[in-house]
Image: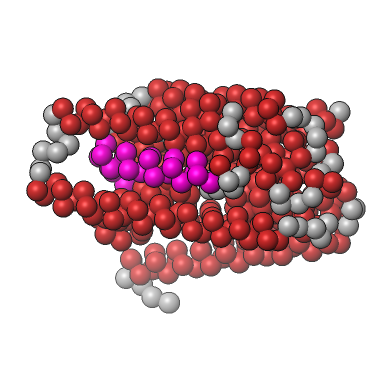
Amino acid sequence: MLVIIAFIVSLFFAMNIGGSGAAATMSVAYGSGAIKKKTTALLLCALGIFLGSLAGDEVVKTIGSGIIPSSILTVKMVIIILAAAAISLFAANVMGIPLSTSEITVGAVVGVGIAYQTLYIQKLLVIVSIWIIIPIIAFTCTYFIGKWFLLMKKKSPYIEQGAWQKTFMVALIITGFFEAFSAGMNNVANAIGPLVGAGLISVTKGTIIGGLFIAFGALLLGHRVLETNGKKITRFSPLEGCVISGTGALLVIISSIFGIPVPLTQITTSAIIGIGTAKSGFYVWQKRIVIQLLKVWLVSPVFSLVISYILVKWLLDSDIYTMVAIISVCLATIGTLSLKKTVTEEKRSLHENGGGI
């Protein structure tokens, strides 16, 4: 029964990965107008993700045994890791926020490692360092290329019109599909890795089954996240979109070859913001959706870490006092942040109405 539950949670998580990953792949093609219909964008996304998942074995090995010893990955532990990650991702999908499945999965695995005081610290530090470096690389590349495009448009105003426009549209769809492939290659490990680490399924079978459910999740849950990343951050032309998708896909595939789980949505969104900054200046950073994304990225791995740690202490160690203490701290933190937000909103309201405090 526990094995069945582990597979159910894993496949549910895989579907939510598809829903979140959709925003990080074909959203650029959709947002730029190369693909008009959401359904078409999500179908291409699903196909690319499935094909890419078949080449994701190195990242599967990292999630399964590269962060914590596979010897502590019992069936119950797998359920806890996947449940903690799935809860975090499902909440983000409901809000329409593109969340990094790699961050929350690694966070959940680390939570278990902390509970049992066994972690491969060096490997974890490498992963976290790459999480910081790669989005910066994506932003920097697209920012400078965006500036170069602006200079090109001044010299050749018609570069994106006529036959060239159609060429760029086709190229954008191709690079978007390439990015979807990279998503499957990197993200299938997040759902299947713990199962493989516990010896419940082989790498080959896991990538096939996981890839199918991620693809299905993209079709079923990806609409809102596709709209968020494609239309609510900044507008971009097909030529700019090619750079965004191509940059993200290349960085993710290189990371996957070396078995590093990376935040795909974070990379793509950083690339989009890089283009937006080149066009509109740092004003784009003041948009509410950008600020919201940054907050979620910072909170998500910690959130899944805390959930997995609490579940271990509650379900396996029966350490009620530790669990209550952690929950109390979390509730107090959330309450403080909510109070601060309320006070800030009241001050803003009074200021707008001519009042004061």
Pick whichever, 40 or 150, lies toward us.
150
Colouring style: secondary structure
Please tell me whether residue 335 is drawn above or below residue 224 in the rendered image.
below
The spot of residue 93 in percent (x, y) is 54, 39
- 139 left or right of 75 in image: left
Q: Which residues are magenta?
A: 232-255
Residue 257, quarter of the rendered image: top right
Pick whichever, 46 or 280, lies toward us.
46
Q: How many marks?
A: 0
Residue 92, quarter of the rendered image: top right
Task: Quarter of the image for the N terminus: give it.
Answer: top right
Q: Is residue 201 among the parts visible in the rendering? A: yes
- 106 left or right of 292 in image: right
Q: Which residue is at 84% across, 47% downward?
A: 72
Please tell me whether residue 319 is drawn above or below residue 259 in the rendered image.
below
The spot of residue 136 in percent (x, y) is 43, 58
Which residue lies most toward the front here? 258
User: Can residue 215 be found in the magenta stretch?
Assistant: no
